[in-house]
Amino acid sequence: MATFTERMGPVLLVWLAVCLGGTWAVDKGNFKTCEQSAFCKRQRAIKPGESPYRALLETMELTNTRLTLQLINDNNKVRLLLELYRLQGNITRVKINELKPLKPRYEVPDVLIREPPTEPLSLLSQDENGVVLSLGPESQRVIVSARPFRLDIVEGRDVLMSLNSRGLLGFEHLRMRKDTQAEPETDNKEGADPANQDENTKEEEEKVEDGMWEETFKSHTDSKPNGPSAVSLDFSLPGVEHVYGIPEHADTLKLKTTDSGDPYRLYNLDVFQYELYNPMALYGAVPVMLAHNAQRTTGIFWLNAAETWVDISSNTAGKTVFGKMLDYVQGSSETPQTDVRWISESGIIDVFLMLGPTPREVFSQYASLTGTQAFPPLASLGYHQCRWNYNDQEDVRSVDAGFDEHDIPYDFIWLDIEHTDGKRYFTWDPHKFASPKEMLQGLMDKKRKMVAIVDPHIKIDTNYKIHNEISSRGFYVKNKDGGDYEGWCWPGSAGYPDFTRPDMRAWWASQFAYDQYEGAMENLYTWNDMNEPSVFNGPEVTMHKDALHGAWEHRDVHNLYGLYVHMATAQGLIERSGGVERPFVLTRAFFAGSQRYGAVWTGDNAAEWDHLKISIPMCLSLSLVGISFCGADVGGFFKSPSTELLVRWYQTGAYQPFFRAHAHLDTPRREPWLFGPENTALIREAVRQRYTFLPYWYQLFYLAYHTGEPVMRPLWVEYPQDPATFALDDEFLLGRDLLVHPVTEEGARGVTAYLPGKDEVWFDIHTFQKHNGGQNLYIPVTMSSIPVFQRGGSIIPRKLRVRRSSTCMEDDPYTLYVALNNQRTAEGELYIDDGHTFNYEKKEFIHRRFSFSNNVLSSVNLEPEAQFTTKSWVERIIILGASNPSTITLRTADGINQLEFDFDASMSVLTIRKPGMNAGADWSVSLQ
């Protein structure tokens, strides 16, 4: 939800008037460019060339697990400490901090799931020019060059990655302010590097104008009591032309070069109806970039939560990469190369180099650091109906009944901010929602659920329990003078809880208990919006950077705030059930690790065709950096979609992980049945298709939870050696086995889909038409068309008896779709558990593998130790690309039976009717 309401204070009303004035589009003037961000401007002004940093090899210390080495800036004599670790799983960690900072610099907590385990480093050679270290039994080495400092990771004769090869390492040391002698508060000034005070006073005074000690943007002044503290580092990627990731941006999947404009910005912001195809910051920030070519996939994880800018440029490797120690390296000087520079306002350099070499291994490497996607309740993979706002309990009841009347399934109905008592979260409007438990029970009786919004800005009101508790416990973020920070948001004047505090998060979690959150029941779940945090009258619509979280400034922790809100809320939903039930929490702001706590969406989009198109690369970019549970507001949040756009958006959203329709307060109602019977039927069919595939979606999320592999993935993940896939972002894969090319052009009569894999075959899931891979296929479309293909060689379980909600389908039977490849084999999986508890951690589930070869289809148990029973059975088997058998025999523990079947010779489709075996049993079906 974003940016209008009524009955607000004067400051907020001015802000709203700006938003409402004329066009519904982002006002770029509210948000900084790099030129307006003093630290970005300073760091970007450093041009490639000779680095002032030199490695002091005589300071090197090598233990079994790490190398330490001092670096010196020959311009100002400030020393840095380099730490290098070889981590398990082909990851190298590089940390750079001041050797003796004036005060501690912020290091990001709570994002890594553990201190990463290390593996031994060994010294291969050393001379006055540098050192060479082994990264294990392979031919991987780290080469540290001394003058200028530079670090290269090499495998065999290939350079995989170089650090500071362009000399753009920058590290602004903490210092005392010369013009006033005002010192930053320090826990320990003893041992501070005297070189910190060596800089020329005149130079310092000149730099004050550059925003080093104070910076003003529009009407807001950032006091910067600690002075300049930015860090930056460049990375060169020889042989790479395609890089991805660093969400969130409304841009193409393949990241663009930034030489002619702003860098990509990572700074969580409440951006009013964002523009497309530019590098502006949006609601979330994951500082992870993937690089890919036909030989290798690698990743860079820049662990820093401050405002960050990322520059990308293209080059040729011969011009910048090879140093004296690499003169034996192969290759023409025309080898393509991508150069990346990361710039952050504060903190330290802490970077994880994930060396692949395959896409799956990079996913696994990143998951080993920040965790995998939370395994969601099955119902949350169904359809969600939302708008700002359903007016009252009768409105909710009426919409709920409308879905039944029009035979459209759904699982969750949502309530936005108007359901509260005056924007006081954890409350209900006493007139419009006077009996919330009665409303929730009515949904529960139909096996449906509700989500209510709980935002992190708290109305300052002494009659409001939540505010009083936070205030009395001292849990609010403080302003630079030590008082409670106040800003304007939906309730008017609001305080902002300090979610960086573990005790604050624990208290917040406790407020979701059924005896605290009045009216809540077990089918009520939560939505965290505005958690960037959004501050309507703040700089760039967010919190002042000199606000305080204990000892740290907001500038140090900004991009973590939303993750902490999400974390505390998810913990609250877990705790309210005594640790039994899985939570469902949607967040708008996020950071690395947010995947552990639930779902995200792409924020306040618009009812425009380009916004439909951009939902695909936006969710693909999130998927590549661990956040699989992604979706976009179906129909667009702002403005009103045409019926054609609305139908196409439902057809697209039905094949994206998080499937929710949402709309702005000022838009006309758009429940699925309000656009005439023909469009209702089209939307119904799209939603019903989603429900038939729920077993496959659930299995993919179980896989994501276990391995870190994305649910929705770019084609290059599965076809990494096919350059035709590297920049595709108008189609995508779900798992390995479903290829989706939504119709996203107005008035389309056809789409051209690339079917990958020259040895593959693909089957249209609607017509069962077989197509060869390795081709661009033109597909004529009508308004009912959703181009989706099943890969030959796969087996996908579906449930074709669609009911009013996913829970109603729990015991329903399966239909197995067996798509044969050219070798006439196929395989797939089926995962079943109770759909909502953590009992799968106790091995209470069914996990089966299906395989077809030599004309035998069999089901075997992948987890013999697991124990679970299901009432579901297999009611039909459909084999695509089949031959006509004379007989079909079923073998189970109960004996041998002959099965009935039909064969469509024109399409080579074999349908086996009513085999009837339990979905959790061992069985085989033989075709003779």
Image: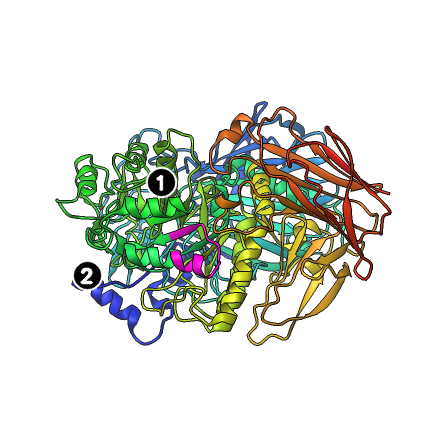
Residue 756 seen in this snapshot: no
Q: Secondary structure at mark 1?
A: helix
Amino acid type at circle 2 is Met
Q: Is residue 786 above or below residue 704?
A: below
Residue farthest left in this picture: 462
Q: Is residue 70 above or below residue 305?
A: above
Where does the image place residue 812, in percent across and percent down from the top left? 57, 43
Residue 303 located left or right of residue 923: left
Q: Residues within 10 Å of mark 1 (few under 14, many from 20)?
A: many
Amino acid type at circle 1 is Thr
Which residue is pictured at 53% across the width and 44% down the height?
301
Which sits in the foreground, 759 or 851?
Answer: 851
Which residue is pictured at 62% across the width and 27% down the height?
121
Residue 818 seen in this snapshot: yes
Where does the image place residue 238, in percent across and percent down from the top left? 67, 51
Q: Secondary structure at mark 2?
A: loop
Q: Residues within 10 Å of mark 2 (few under 14, many from 20)?
A: some
Residue 210 picture quarter: bottom left
Mark earlier in primary sequence (1, 2):
2
Where does the image place residue 331, in percent across and percent down from the top left? 76, 52
Residue 857 located left or right of residue 656: right
Magenta stretch? Answer: 401-413
Which sits in the foreground, 90 or 223?
Answer: 90
Quadrant housing the N terminus: bottom left
Quadrant housing the C terminus: top right
Where does the image place residue 926, in percent across and percent down from the top left? 81, 40
The span from disc 1 to disc 2 (Cα, nearest Å) is 27 Å
Which sits in the foreground, 56 or 467?
Answer: 467
Name the residue beneath numbered marker 1: 569
Name the residue beneath numbered marker 2: 8
